[in-house]
Amino acid sequence: LQERGALGFERHYHVTDPFIRRLGLEAELQGHSGCVNCLEWNEKGDLLASGSDDQHTIVWDPLHHKKLLSMHTGHTANIFSVKFLPHSGDRILITGAADSKVHVHDLTVKETIHMFGDHTNRVKRIATAPMWPNTFWSAAEDGLIRQYDLRENSKRSEVLIDLTEYCGQLVEAKCLTVNPQDNNYLAVGANGPFVRLYDIRMIHNHRKSMKQSPSAGVHTFCDRQKPLPDGAAQYYVAGHLPVKLPDYNNRLRVLVATYVTFSPDGTELLVNMGGEQVYLFDLTYKQRPYTFLLPKKCHAAGEVQNGKTSTNGVSNGLHLHSNGFRLPEGRAHASPQVELPPYLEQLKQQANEAFACQLWTQAIQLYSKAVQKAPNNAMLYGNRAAAYMKRKWDGDHYDALRDCLKAISLNPCHLKAHFRLARCLFELKYVAEALECLDDFKGKFPEQAHSSACDALDRDINAALFSKSDNAEDKKGGGPIRLRATGRKDSISEDEMVLRERSYDYKFRYCGHCNTTTDIKEANFFGSNAQYIVSGSDDGSFFIWEKETTNLVRVLQGDESIVNCLQPHPSYCFLATSGIDPVVRLWNPRPESETLNGRVVVDMEGASQANQRRMNADPLEVMLLNMGYRITGLTSSGAGGSDDEDSSEGQVQCRPS
């Protein structure tokens, strides 16, 4: 066991498919008297720290289910974050709380040795980094990211990032994390759909050069000094969310990043978006959002703009890769499609059968399995797009649009993908683009120009174009309404607008959980290779997805009310969770001899649909539901809050290929 390479082998294989299928409850650690809001493993994985509403922190020996130490932190309100300071021999623990304070504790003497009171609102997260010994960061609802250096005698911190300079006084920082492979990169989540990635080193170098420059304090209005240097910040956003903001605001549905974390290799960023889904962003192979209205003056040189510019100077076209949605000139001819191997053909047929039975999620999961094995098959993307469009959960039409574009890039003559693309654009409120796409479709496939589906979509588009509804008024506003927040004190700066317009889109989306009730809900990578994604939920369960297929593989009941925290062990298939209950729960693969696991949620599809309804429900209805009242609107069969699309689809859309 002590041979060289044993640890590497263990960490590589410690989370596998059979282990996930056998994951169950091992123990409950009791000792807190309030909600447990945060958990943190030490680097070795032999200690687990927890923080609670009871203002205590407890250090556990989780492998033996023992409480090693309990201390009052000196906070006067709920603890939201707890972290071991790297290179301190697990002696120094840092806590942040709702009393706006950050405290540093010496566990060997059970004393609080530093108290920082620089924030003016609740402290939601602490972050540490091995490369920065004696240094840590905090994010608070005053909109500030502060940096602390325990080596300095002055017991103060400095402001690293001030979000209020970009977003106005109402912005709240909710979470932050440091890239484990390159500790110079810091990710920050706040209220709103945008997640921010900062280069700490660039910010520090910029501040130093400002201090050293003799003219640093002298500048005119035209020569305004930026708070951050160019290139020090990069934004990420799910491409459809800025467009949805006005609708969400009208329904009192709040978007807020409740947790951000990097993959073990530092190449991916995972975000639990409160009020929405879990999103994974690829930091290496970045992609621009497919539907983004960009003010003309902010177009970067060399960017491809497929579409026309409206009279108000806002590009009304899709921001796509070079293939765009414009179809090649001339009539279409069938493009030869590469045949699938027999086992994938069988998988596709199973998906088609699920589609025919209106089992949309099952069809999506089967198509996703096939897509993972055959990523260059246009038909699979086209079929999955059809299933997304039928299911109509939040974000499904945008995923369908992405799949249609992928199918067309692989097979420019994919008839159904072209038509579905026009329908997706319409459903996403890009009415002018939908009309242009439909006209191109008619030119490319004239035999379909007067099909029932084409005529129906044509009628829908023209009705929307001439409608004087609120949606049409929203559209008049062009780009700013889609990129700016609304409110009296939400003064979005020009720098912020430019950063938002340069945002990158997500790679994967994970659906099924619900995140609307608490703003500390976590999502994490599970496994040294980040093979799985785990997230808590408002229904008291936690959800486990395969990372690459995005398929939901397991749901377990983790709390009587809400699961907020999920922290995987660094080297075992071992998971610690907590939530509203005053306990910490430990999960690992149960022995094969244990046949009964009472915490498994068997009907994963039913749980996911219920969570979609919950996310789209009126906030008052959700409150009543939590109190035990049954609300008719929450138990209806429809999910996602969308109207049914026209059923007369003709031969171009109704069936998968």
Image (cartoon, helix red, strand yellow):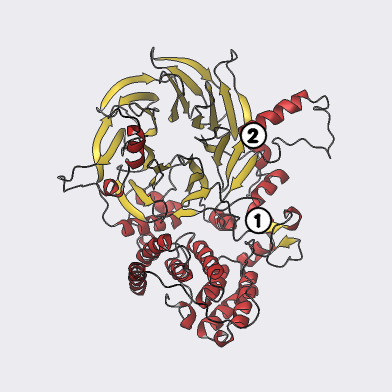
Which residue is painted at 62% across and 61% down in the image? 321
The residue that disc 1 covers is 481
Which corner quadrant holds the N terminus? top left
Q: Position of residue 224 (x, y in %)?
A: 79, 37
Q: Is residue 195 above or below residue 356?
A: above
Residue found at the far front of this picture: 4
Q: Is residue 539 above or below residue 606?
A: above
Nearest to viewer (mark 1 / mark 2)? 2
| Position of residue 6 measured from the top left corner of the image (x, y, whole percent) | 32, 33
**SS at circle 1:** helix
Mark pair 1, 2: CA separation:
23 Å
Q: Residue at x 68, y 37 (%)?
A: 165
- Image height check: is 429 above or below 649? above
Q: Please tell me how crowded label 2 is: few (under 14), some (14-19), or many (20+) other residues with Cα within 10 Å.
A: some
Residue to which mark 2 is pinned: 162
Nearest the camera: 637 or 68? 68
Say whether disc 1 or disc 2 marks the residue closer to the N-terminus: 2
- For the image, the number of numbered tags is 2
Q: Is residue 526 visible?
A: yes
Give the residue type at disc 1: Ile
- Which residue is drawn at the image coordinates 48% and 50% (left, top)? 279
Q: Which amino acid type is shown beneath numbered disc 2?
A: Asp
| 157 left or right of 94 in image | right
Could you say whether the residue bearing mark 2 is in a helix, strand or loop? strand
Q: Position of residue 176 (x, y in %)?
A: 52, 36
Place of residue 583 in the rendered image (x, y in percent of width and height, measured from the top left)? 30, 33
Quarter of the figure with residue 352:
bottom left
Q: Quadrant of residue 294?
A: bottom right
For label 1, the crowd category at 10 Å Cα-Cα, with few meaning under 14, some 14 to 19 and many 20 or more, is some
Q: Quadrant of the C terminus?
A: bottom left
